[in-house]
């Protein structure tokens, strides 16, 4: 019995095409989900980097003004202590000014950002610097840095 050329070249059926379309669609949805997770993770990493840099910035401000002590844990106040200013600032005024400028930076650079410094009068003095912010889908996050800065 001979086969005719028509029987050898049947081609694809509608079922095979639909199955292939479903497989490709599921793959594309998976790729899109993976891409979205990558974007979300990079955003979180960016905010964490900013928080670490802001906490380090405050630690450096405290190291420069070592005699500010408990004033860094107190109320923030805008003084005329910026570089190039014509007034001499006390260590307490400089600490309050540093805290004010730093808290403004935290609020400007992080979504719902807030920064707090806690002073503990141990030997050497300990400063606990906290930076908190809100992220969509994650909630509230906090970065904390404790530094020991001796008075000279």
Image (cartoon, rainbow, N blue to C red):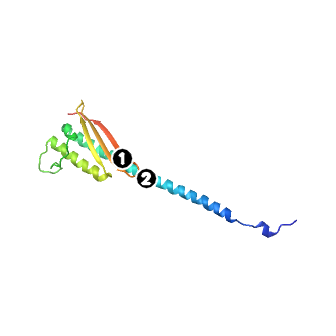
- Please give left or right for residue 93 compared with residue 113 in the image: left
Quadrant of the image for the N terminus?
A: bottom right
Ranked by sequence position, the earlier of labels 1 and 2 is 2
Q: Position of residue 74 (x, y in %)?
A: 20, 41
Q: Residue at x 57, y 57 (%)?
A: 26
* 49 left or right of 126 in image: right
Q: Please tell me whether residue 3 is drawn above or below residue 92 in the rendered image.
A: below
Q: Secondary structure at mark 1?
A: strand
- Above or below, comparing residue 28 to residue 70 in the picture: below
* Residue 27 visible, this angle: yes
> In the drawing, does residue 69 fall left or right of residue 15?
left
In the image, residue 106 above or below residue 125: below
| Residue 92, above or below 8 | above
- Residue extending farthest to the top is 123
**Res. 50 visible in picture:** no
The image shows residue 72 at horizontal and vertical percentages of 21, 40
Residue 140 is tagged as 1
Tell me the element at label 2. helix
Q: Measure how far apart labels 1 and 2 are at the Cα level.
A: 15 Å
Residue drawn at 34 percent across, 44 percent down: 142
């Amino acid at each position: 019995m001979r086969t005719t050329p028509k029987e050898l070249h049947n081609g694809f059926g509608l079922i095979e095409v639909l199955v292939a379309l479903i497989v490709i669609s599921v793959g594309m949805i998976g790729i899109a989900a993976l891409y979205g997770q990558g974007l979300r993770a990079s955003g979180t990493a960016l905010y964490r980097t900013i928080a670490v840099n802001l906490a380090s910035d405050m630690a450096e401000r405290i190291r420069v003004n070592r005699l500010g002590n408990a004033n860094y844990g107190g109320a923030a106040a805008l003084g005329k202590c910026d570089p190039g200013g014509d007034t001499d600032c006390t260590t307490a005024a400089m600490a309050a000014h540093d805290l004010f400028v730093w808290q403004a930076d935290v609020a400007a650079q992080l979504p719902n950002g807030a920064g707090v410094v806690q002073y503990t009068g141990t030997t050497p003095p300990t400063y606990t610097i906290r930076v908190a912010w809100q992220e969509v889908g994650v909630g509230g996050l906090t970065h904390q840095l404790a530094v020991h800065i001796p008075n000279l």
